[in-house]
Image (tube, rainbow, N blue to C red):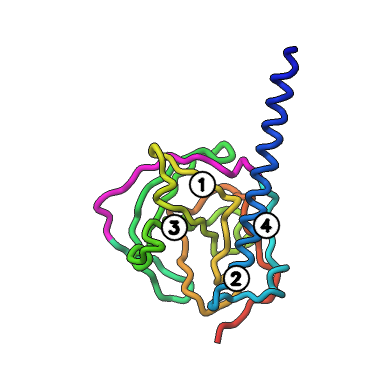
Amino acid sequence: MKIFPILLLFISLNTFAQSYSEQITKHREVYKQDFLKDSHSPLKEADLQQLHFFEIDSAYRIMAKVDILTNEKIFKMPTYDGTSKEFYRYAKISFNLSGTSVNMTLYKNVALSMNPAYKDLLFLPFTDQTNQKETYGGGRYIDLREKDIKDHQIEVDFNKAYNPYCAYSDGYRCPVPPEENDLQIEVKAGEKLYTGKKKHKN
């Protein structure tokens, strides 16, 4: 009789793993299709086969402690085209990943925060030790929302890390991840290097 609780736990965990994998797979499909819906997108349908991702790994889905910052001044975050965009530091987050204690900063884009559709959008740009090898050298991004913060915690899923448009084409104003979000570990999750030819925006 004692075997049943163990069996049910195994089934439950297996179902969770499948469900999570399906969730991320669906997320990636929506991500690809969004390129076709965006009139400013650097990619066409034929280019989507050149997008690649690490295997889905729930170990990269973590809960981070959130410390909201106050009285932060607006600063100019450099972009890869030599200009800049205005941001301010919204919160510090801390968590453990691959046995390493990690501290990162969440930002808010000043212009987007004025738009009702994006007013609670949080921006998490980062670089890590896979850059230039398995992932885009300019780092990757994760989008979060203020409403995702509950009890001073937020879920950060590196399986959803994506490349900026600058990974596919020149002519875009992609923010350069600040040095404070340079991770000294390999983040083998999310989007990998684009294998198509880099485009030139007219």
Q: Specify which label sits upstream in the sequence, 4 or 1.
A: 4
> Mark 4: which amino acid?
Phe
Residue 46: quarter of image: bottom right
Residue shown at 60%/62% (left/top)? 31
> Mark 2: which amino acid?
Phe
The relative height of residue 45 versus residue 142 in the rendered view (above or below) is below
Q: Is mark 3 on a helix, strand or loop?
A: strand
Q: Mark 2 points at which residue?
A: 35
Q: Mark 1 points at which residue?
A: 156
> Mark 1: which amino acid?
Val
Of badges 2 and 4, nearer the viewer stands: 2
Percent position of residue 142, x then y: 51, 56
Q: Name the residue under label 3.
A: 123
Q: Specify which label sits upstream in the sequence, 3 or 4.
A: 4
> Mark 3: which amino acid?
Phe
Q: What element carries label 4?
A: loop
Q: Name the residue under label 4.
A: 53
Instruction: Give the side of residue 63 with respect to residue 71, left or right.
Output: right
Q: Specify which label sits upstream in the sequence, 2 or 4.
A: 2
